[in-house]
Image (tube, rainbow, N blue to C red):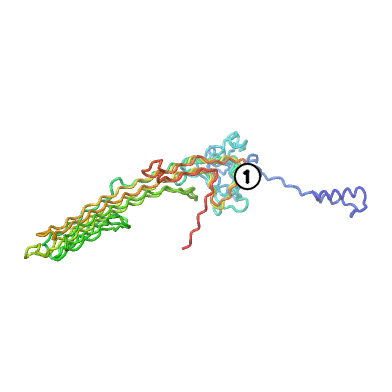
Amino acid sequence: MARVVVALAICVCGASTLTGCPYSDPCWEVEACEPDPVPPPGPCEGQPGTAPALDECGVFVSPLSGDDRSPGTKDAPVKTLQHAIGLAAGGRGNGEAPTRRVYACGGVFEEAITLPSGVDLWGGRRCDGGGEWSYEGSFGGPDHPTIIAPPVGIPLRVLGGDDAFITGDDATSMIFGVRAAAADGSASDGKSSIAMILSPGARATVRESAILAGDGKEGEPGEDAPSSRATDGTVGNDGADACTADAARGALPVVTVCGEGIESTGGYGGDGGIERGRGGTLGRPELVGDPGEQGLGGSGAVTMPCWDGENGPNGAPAERAAGAVGPGRLGIDGWLGVRGEDGKRGGAGQGGGGGGGGKGRDPTRNACPAGRPQGGAAGGSGGSGGCGGKGGQGGDYGGASIAIVALQGSELTVESGEIRGAKGGDGGVGGTGQWGGIGWDGGLGGHGAATDSSRGCRGGFGGDGGRGGDAGGGLGGHSFGIASMGAAVAILPHATVVPGQAGEGGPGANATAESGLGQGEDGTALFWYRFDAPAPETPR
């Protein structure tokens, strides 16, 4: 415009007088000063609601009249969206350039589709009344939207990066006139419902469309540990009688194998001797701390008769496990929640201590008759303890309901339409723990002869196994309109982005609702939630 004004000023100058004008006829420059002509718009340019639908502009798809063997023109549309997207991204063949656009009839497509960034999906076309393929009115208007509603799976996934095959600033997909509706619990985890995912690096604009998540499913309860008790202990072995050997060997220990490398072992019985009996040994496993009793072995006879082995203490019951906490994490398959913590195994009961051994001779007389071995009786071994009960398994997380997931490096713009989450699933209840096994009594000491100090003493009882821990409840499922992680998200004023209702955390096993013990964390309901990116792995 400045150039035009200058030229007009020169012309006015020349028309009135030539005084002061640098040229005798400056008006010859007027034509050169006019602005460059604006080229007319291309036949494929324009807004989705008003631009003409031409064969050269896109691939046409109709769920009723289409055939995937057709070329995808207005008169010969294809049948499935995914096939149409492939033709739009790669071309119809015969050297034809890719159109990068799909025109879709209003109607229902029961398929989960992937859309490369840079390929537009313009839905809601009128193609059953004369084949005009026009779009009249906005979403919810007279035209039926293109409904993408597979029975399972994520209805719409936009690819980015190397998966998109299209690069540059124009590698953004316009999604228009579409209703992507996810079925309940249809994501790959079998619990969450997600309607649309932007893969890493993908770019998409949503306009006049509805992206609707279904409900998340409730988390499965954690598996209960066996209802029967854990493995019981074993009765200790009896000691040898007096006068059977000069040094009667104490009774051998008994062992209960509990799994996970844990064993409960009764203590050895003390040896019987001529002048003195040996003490029994400690039961195993030796408990940490000071539980009072320790399954000590009984002392052997010296100046006094022998002592019985002490009883092994019971194994410690496992504490209740914690409920699930944390937001979970996003990934290429959607959202992964958090299970409740598994219950721990109860402690094994300690084996009883071995009984002390007797002696065959005291200061006044011998216990054993002449001509027979002179050793006192041996002590019995301690009984082994019962195994600790197994813990219950944590409750599973409830499925999330997320309309759109945007992953690292993706760019999402929601210009208009409806983005809506639904109901997140409740977390599952934790599984109950198992009762520990019963500890058994120790073996009897050998019989004495003539003197009290010649007898052997019995082994102690093994302790009962501790009860396995009750497990925690699972995380409640979230409800988000949009969930993102390292993505650029823009929500314009004409867009409606709303969550539904979040799921409740699962209860802990054997816990009342009032106590809240082992309760999983409730899900979160927000129109947009930004997840933290995972921490980089540390090189080994």
Decide which of 120, 194 is in the foreground and name it.
194
Decide which of 139, 32 is in the foreground and name it.
139
Q: Is residue 151 visible?
A: no
Disc 1 packing (10 Å; few <14; some 14–19; many ≥20): many
Decide which of 316, 22 is in the foreground and name it.
316
Question: Helix or strand or loop: what does disc 1 sit on?
Answer: helix
Give the residue displayed 51% in from the left and 40% down from the top: 500
Judge left or right: residue 64 versus residue 15: left
Q: Amino acid at mark 1?
A: Cys
Name of the residue lying farthest toward the left? 370
Give the residue displayed 23% in from the left and 61% down from the top: 281
Decide which of 220, 214 is in the foreground and name it.
220
Q: Is residue 273 above or below residue 215?
A: below
Judge left or right: residue 240 versus residue 68: left
Pinpoint residue 7: horizontal percent, then vertical percent: 84, 50
Judge left or right: residue 405 versus residue 459: right
Give the residue displayed 66% in from the left and 44% down from the top: 45
Pinpoint residue 394: horizontal percent, then vertical percent: 39, 47
Q: How many marks?
A: 1
Judge left or right: residue 433 versus residue 145: left
Residue receiving disc 1: 57
